[in-house]
Amino acid sequence: MTTIGFVGVGTMGGPMARNLVKGDFQVRVFDIDAARTNALVEAGAQGAGSPKDAATDAEMVITMLPNGPHVQQAVFGRDGIAEGIGRDALYIDMSTIAPAVTDQVGKELRERGISAIDAPVGMGAPQAAEGKLLIMVGGSEADLARAMPALEKMGETIIHCGAFGMGVRMKVVNNYLSTALCAMTAETVALAEACGFDPQLAVKVMMGTVAGKGHLGVTFPNKVLKGDLTPGFMVDLAHKDLGLALELAAGYNVPLATGAAAHQIYAIARAQGRGRQDQTCLLDTIRSLGGKGTS
């Protein structure tokens, strides 16, 4: 039976570790909150007194921790994973942390002869409990193959994103879109309410348009990512309509900070002579501002 050390069994790590136990792995868990460790022991895991203890004689060692310093401490601190993990073991960090920290942890482990992958997860605690996470993996094909039996018990969609460190980079990119959209969605619902609409009515309307269906699912794959900038909805009109929304919101004293920032990006695109291109040309505008050229 394969032994897996698991460090960090909180909101996400707890149900993930449980699924490994259900998957007939021998799971040895550690968490700074002893109650969390004890709950996993009651579910069939073994308890460990430190990250080192969790890692000793394990074929795989997983960390699922809140932030970079926690990962560094768990791996390289006193009684850390690095003191117990064997050279034949595979280290898997499933935390969402700064990519620079991921890179450094991987570099130091490789210098010790230890293989590693990064495998942060998408979705939340309900999917973690169901074993239906989306897992973004960075690492070699060979190390991914070693990890797959365990990853498949925790997730139903496992995507190889590239070399070590690319998993967490993909997670950061994904969460940028999610968190920024949350802010704009809050602004939008607040504006709808200020106008006197029932939010549920506003949602019903927007779910029938690109506003609700999302540009990644509709416009970007069909326009700019195909190199087609013939206007489905041109920049000039988008700029005008966004200006109308900002003017409307000002009348109701509803702050649209993200909308105002977006309005400036449309203004820059117009200044670049893109006014009559499809609004997805904003991708090329952003690329040009970052010195990356265009599609």
Image: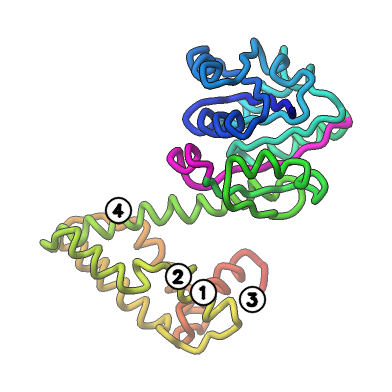
Q: Quadrant of residue 259?
A: bottom left
Q: Earlier in the sequence, mark 1 or mark 4?
A: 4
Q: Quick check: marks 2 and 1 in contact, CB under 8 Å?
A: yes
At numbered mark 3, what does the secondary structure look like: helix, strand or loop?
loop
Residue topped by disc 4: 186
Residue topped by disc 3: 294
Per the model, the C-alpha gap separating discs 1 and 3 is 14 Å
Residue topped by disc 2: 215
Q: Quadrant of the N terminus?
A: top right
Q: Quadrant of residue 76?
A: top right
Nearest to the observer: residue 237 or residue 251: 237
Q: Earlier in the sequence, mark 1 or mark 3?
A: 1
Assess disc 2: are there few (<14), some (14-19) or many (≥20) residues with their C-alpha within 10 Å of its C-alpha. Answer: few
Q: Quadrant of the C terminus?
A: bottom right
Residue topped by disc 1: 220
Magenta run includes residue 116: yes
Q: Position of residue 72 (x, y in %)?
A: 68, 26
Mark number, residue 26: none
Q: Position of residue 16 (x, y in %)?
A: 55, 34
Q: Amino acid at mark 4?
A: Ala
Q: Amino acid at mark 1?
A: Phe
Q: Quick check: marks 1 and 3 in contact, CB under 8 Å?
A: no
Q: Is residue 235 above or below residue 34?
A: below
Q: Amino acid at mark 3?
A: Thr
